[in-house]
Image (cartoon, helix red, strand yellow):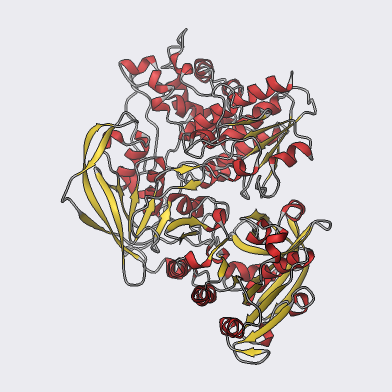
Amino acid sequence: MYKILRKEELAPKIFLMDIEALRIASSCLPGQFVIVKVDEKGERIPLTICDYDPEKGTVTIVFQTVGVSTNRMAEYEVGESFEDVVGPLGNHSDLMNMSMEELKKKNIIFVAGGVGTAPVYPQVKWLHDHGIKADVIVGSKSKNYLLFEDKLKPICDNLYITTDDGSYGYKGFGVDLLKELIDKKTKDYNYVVAIGPMIMMKFVTQLTKKYGIKTIVSLNPIMVDGTGMCGACRVTVGGKVKFACVDGPEFDGHLVNFDEAMRRQTMYKTDEGRNILKKEEKEEGDTSDKKDEECRAEIKFNKMHRVPIKEQDPKVRATNFDEVCLGYTEEEAVKEASRCLNCKKPMCVTQCPVSINIPKFIEQVKNRNFEEAARIIAESSALPAVCGRVCPQETQCEGKCIMGRKGDPIAIGKLERFVADWSRENNIDLSKTLPKNSKKVAVIGSGPSGLTCAGDLAKLGYDVTVFEALHKAGGVLVYGIPEFRLPKDKVVQHEVENVEKLGVKIETDTIVGRTITIDELIEKEGFKAVFIGSGAGLPRFMGIPGENLNGVFSANEFLTRNNLMQAFKEDYDTPIKIGKKVVVVGGGNVAMDSARTALRLGSEVCIVYRRSREELPARVEEVHHAEEEGIKFNFLTNPVEILGDERGWVKGIKCVKMELGEPDESGRRRPVKIEGSEFDIDADTVIMALGTSPNPLIASTTKGIEMNKRGCLVVQEDTGLTKRQGIYAGGDAVTGSATVILAMGAGKKAAKAIDEYLKK
């Protein structure tokens, strides 16, 4: 929790708050921002840091009440606390990258509009503290809305005030006054920093471009998530797509496509809320609250065939976010376990990335000793309820099951799920560890690789702290996988708590590389080893025309809003934009998740995939479920352009038909365009589910860490050791986006290597 130490209403609907945030205050710099979340149901709100005091451990934010979430922020008083404050985020001001000699050659003027005055203040203050004089123009609607006049006067060379209504200072806009100052040659300005409303920054850059004056703008207003994960803040700069939260927030204003950025800014108008986003209900009414107990009928038990598992009826589940698979009963689990041959050389174990003793735990299920089965699994896996639900067992353990040669393989995943759920429901304590040894290990990221590594090391007696950038632990398990596949409170949260019971500490809202660096963890906080399990959250796009139209989303943004921020629930603040006709581009599990989520939000959905059905990388079960629910598939189809209307919103997607040629480097037949096969698909929403890559933040802020050409961390395959002693990495940060269980296997391998390293 982050306590409010000071609150002040600076102007009508504009508030200043000092927030207690020790780590952020000690590491932030002018130009950076934070994400504020008022409570469990609140939206993630990006706010530029106005000031900071490392000694007091405070950061100062300024915000204007423009919607539901900011109005709720304004209701908080001194002594109350926000649930989450994440930061510092983004890059610091470009001015701080210059030498003092270079800065002294600059004649700098800031143009601040409205609430944009707040982030201007710390930059001017930093310049003043380093002996550099700058001029400032502050614009507002009227005198009543003027901010920071008293604070800026002592630290800038010349302060110019403008008001739209002429109630104070210069009558007119800041850009008009800037033109006068340039024309009068009061100073020979050669560097302009403009921060404020998007339209103001656009006009300033249009003016300065005519005079050839370097101009920097801050694109904080278009951010959503702020950690580089959702892709919502993408903007075209110099003809290239950039992400404001990772590459910015400051950019060369002359290169920014402001029209596009302003259009994207209108995507989520909080005040209009769900009334806009839910403009039209289904003609037959909302059935999401209706419960239907109809499930698949059981078939007669046959030892060569697995015991069928009950699921929600497809027509019913397509209207709700309840879990699709209902799981085995005790009797069904025992019956399925009795099919296991208990092989002397179990091939299933060889294909399990975390090496669970599969025959041994199944034998205990067969004998109804469920607690012992849970303990056997816990020796190898920290996330059995998760793995039982989302692991691709068909290509791993079950793919090697002997029973599968003549019949159905044992339902290993479903049995693992049953044991884990039984353990949870019966409060089984699985927190046995070796005596603590006081050696500190830092784990970056609380996804499957991080939790696995942390859990294994805690069992060995190490003092483990996990640092998580988001406000909830779980990584991709929380933000990436929908509720209908993986319940968050019932399953993920419980397994996170089990890891905590081992003695693992989890610090949320901590971005390693910004809030604190790896070097600081080692040098200042005494960690003897570090595991990087930060995942791969930077979304990919195709680079085709129209990709920055309103209505185009990365799967990360779409799923994060729905899963992490619970946008599908009426009582949560986060909006989610969904149209009547949705096209999902991609063929992996993430594409299936996006399509099935959009369907549940009331859309007609089709998936576009450039290869054939046989090449689909998604799990067979997920494809089957999607088809049952009514998702349409367009195979051998590739998008070449996203079509927009006159308002800049998606109206369709232009595709070409493909045929399979010779195999490429992946071993799969390469799709080849069929000339003259272009056709359009009507759509008002397009979701790009094309995979992700690691965020470069950690590598760029840590000495001795190397990345390959794909942006993945370079490590030793057998240990996860990076190029630097004592620092290990695994999971998607190393491989790029892959499966949960492979990430867990990497975390397990690294934990073993760290233990061996620290015992030397």
Quarter of the image with the C terminus is: top right
Residue at the outermost left position: 676
Q: Nearer the viewer, residue 420 or 353?
A: 353
Residue at the outermost top position: 344
Q: Looking at the picture, how far across and down is residue 589, in whole percent? A: 40, 40
Residue at the outermost right position: 55
Q: Residue at x 64, y 26 (%)?
A: 751
Q: 676 above or below 107?
A: above
Residue 433 visible in the picture: yes
Residue 37 visible in the picture: no
Quarter of the image with the N terminus is: bottom right
Q: Nearer the viewer, residue 641 or 738?
A: 641
Q: Looking at the picture, how far across and down is residue 262, in whole percent? A: 47, 70
Q: Looking at the picture, how far across and down is residue 649, in whole percent? A: 36, 66
Q: Looking at the picture, how far across and down is residue 386, in whole percent? A: 52, 35
Q: 582 above or below 416?
A: below
Q: How many marks?
A: 0
Q: Residue at x 52, y 76 (%)?
A: 211
In the rendered structure, the answer to whether residue 435 lies left or right of residue 340 reads: right
Q: 638 above or below 36?
A: above
